[in-house]
Amino acid sequence: MANKRVYEIMYIVAPETADDDLTKINETIVQVIESQGGTIANTDNMGRRKLAYPIDKKTEGHYVLLEVEGTGKEILELERRMRVNDAIIRFITVRVDEDRKTADKQKAKRDARQVRRNVASNRGGANQESEQESAGQNQ
Amino acid sequence: MTDKKPDNFDEVVASVDIDLVSEQKNERMPQRRYQRRRQGTFVPDYVDWKDIDYLRRFIPERGKIMPRRISGINAKDQRRIAQAIKRARSMALIPFVTD
């Protein structure tokens, strides 16, 4: 299997870090990933958010989301770094390629069924028209 | 206590007890089964743990995950949604308990 594993990494940075420290942290993380051979597909700086419960007595945090493609090695190195860094108070890594693959397959099956229904109803009469309506409502 | 049993003791026991118990059970069970079963909450193919607006409908005020018999979704989707909620909770997007 090629290195097509896709991961979503979200981490929370403590709110009192200055903005340039934040960018420094982000860049370090990007460097770690790319040095291990991964590629970054997306980044999303979600900004400051109120936490649902206090972590380390803090009530807000800076959320950052990354989407990474690669093998698993960069995740290992990255998590090690994040654990050591005190500014990052929480992180999570989720592997999403399998789930997305099954979701795409289910969507493709559903679309194929819809196409077949449309073709059948175009050929058929009034009975099958109502079937197409109900299929359209289910969608 | 050694009471003298009446002669038709066995017959009385056989005729009375079992019917009563099963009747009570039957009366109770249908009422509990059809309690608040909603239909047709749509679950997408991929449940995104970051989409808390969608996940919120499965978390009533107390913060607990809604059981299947109330939300009315099937087992596979319930497992997916529960996993997504737990991930979102670990990242402080949803609280564990609300007061």
Image (cartoon, helix red, strand yellow):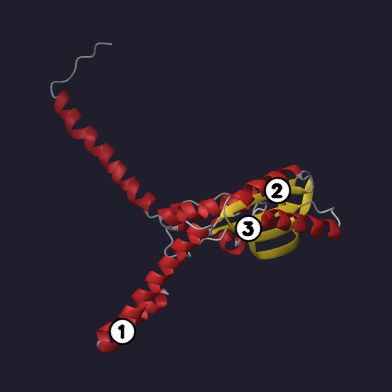
Earlier sequence position, callout 2 versus callout 3: 3
Q: Amino acid at mark 3?
A: Gly
Measure how far apart labels 2 and 3 are at the Cα level.
22 Å
The residue indicated by pointer 2 is: A90
Identify the chain of the residue marked 2, using the numbered disc in the image.
A
Dot 3: chain letter: A
Image-based side of B15 in relation to B80, left or right: left
Mark 1 belongs to which amino acid? Val
Mark 2 vs mark 3: tell me if same chain: yes
Expressed as whole percent of the image width and height from the top left, the position of residue B62 reads 61, 50
**Mark 1 → mark 2, Cα distance in angstroms:** 52 Å
**Image disc number at residue A38:** 3
Point out the tag, 1 or 2, that comes first from the N-terminus. 2
Reading the image, the residue beneath label 1 is A119
Mark 1: few/some/many CA within 10 Å (<14, 14-19, 20+): few
Q: Which quadrant does the C terminus of chain A fall into?
A: bottom left
Q: Report helix, strand or loop for mark 3.
A: loop
Q: Is residue A102 visible?
A: yes
**Is the residue marked by circle 2 packed among few (<14), some (14-19), or many (20+) residues within 10 Å?**
some
Label 2: element kind: strand
Does residue A78 appear to the left or right of A87 in the view shown?
Answer: left
Is residue A51 in view? no
Count of numbered tags: 3
Judged left or right of residue B27, residue B42 is right
Report the front residue among B58 and B79. B79
Instruction: Give A1 or B14, whichever is nearer the viewer.
Output: A1
Q: Which residue of the protein is positioned furthest toward the top in this rendering?
A: B2
- Are the two marked residues, 3 and 1, in contact with CB atoms closer than 8 angstroms? no
Give whichever of discs 3 and 1 has the lower sequence position. 3
Between label 3 and label 1, give the one nearer the viewer.
3
- At 29% from the left and 45% from the top, the residue drawn is B26
